[in-house]
Image (cartoon, rainbow, N blue to C red):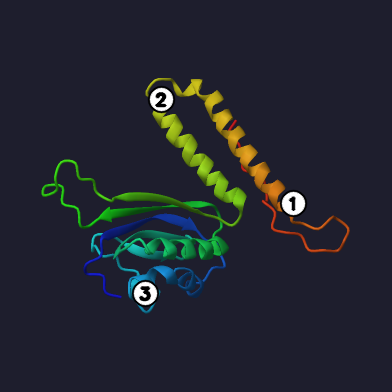
Amino acid sequence: MSRYNAPFEIHVHGEVPLRHDVSYTQLQDALKPLWTYAGAKSLADGAESAYEEEPGIKFDAPEHLLRMCWTVPGDEDFRQSLDEMCMSLNELSEQGAAIEVTFYDAEFDEEEEPPEAESRDDFVMLFVGPTPAAIMQVQRDLLVEDVINLMERHFDGSELGGVVAEIDKLFGQRFDALVNSLEIGKPPRGTGGGSGHGGGRRPRHLH
């Protein structure tokens, strides 16, 4: 798939803990939306980044980790490939994980553009995990880290316990709402019907 005039350079970055039983073949299938987008015929063929200094897409079998630091030329349609990849990685993941995706405007030249011109750069944070609770845990941890880093410019870390507790409360409410919405679709207990996909354990709270 030739993309010599692609409007974006798209960088995918992240690490995903995988189940111990995940094979290279399963991972190749899960990442097919990425390597086929790059015009490759296999994961091995498409794992190299557009930039030699980047490690690309690596399967760390001993550590059971998927490591990604990979750039590909592309367009907005790459977002569909990302959605498909995340759905597949959910099935293979051991824990929740975040994947950062940056769209760099390849057609924007800051020196040549008029002062009022703006690039089309964009940043997307994606989350994968074996359960909704695992995904929410990663979202919660990242938010706490961001808020603490911001507020420690003005307050000592020991003063921020109440802020963290409020964040936990918000995520607890979101998790409960998700579980309740899933419960609505389940048959009454004792009817012999199969249960729907529950939210699993509630995310851990930092006390």
Q: Position of residue 144 (x, y in %)?
A: 49, 35
**Which residue lies under the disc numbered 1?**
183
Instruction: Say whether marks 3 and 2 touch (CB < 8 Å).
Output: no
Q: Position of residue 202 (x, y in %)?
A: 66, 44
Quarter-of-image position of residue 117: top left
Badge 2 crowding class, 10 Å Cα cut-off, few under 14, some 14 to 19, many 20 or more, is few
Closest to the observer, 83 or 22: 83
- Is residue 27 shown left or right of residue 205? left
Mark 3 or 1, closer to the camera: 1
Looking at the image, tell me whether mark 3 or mark 2 is earlier in sequence order. Answer: 3
- At label 2, the amino acid type is Glu
Badge 1 crowding class, 10 Å Cα cut-off, few under 14, some 14 to 19, many 20 or more, is some
Q: Position of residue 80 (x, y in %)?
A: 43, 64
- At label 3, the amino acid type is Ala
The CA span between labels 3 and 2 is 44 Å
The residue shown at (49%, 75%) is: 25
Badge 3 crowding class, 10 Å Cα cut-off, few under 14, some 14 to 19, many 20 or more, is few
- Is residue 153 shown left or right of residue 115? right
Counting labels gives 3
- At label 1, the amino acid type is Glu
Say above or below: 195 vs 121: below
- Is residue 41 shown left or right of residue 143? left
Q: Give the position of the N terminus as an image quadrant.
A: bottom left
**Which residue lies under the disc numbered 3?**
44
The CA span between labels 2 and 1 is 40 Å
Instruction: Say whether marks 3 and 1 touch (CB < 8 Å).
Output: no
Question: Which residue reaches farthest bottom?
Answer: 41
Q: Secondary structure at mark 3?
A: helix
The CA span between labels 3 and 1 is 42 Å
The circle drawn on residue 152 is: 2
The residue shown at (15%, 51%) is: 109
Looking at the image, tell me whether mark 3 or mark 1 is earlier in sequence order. Answer: 3
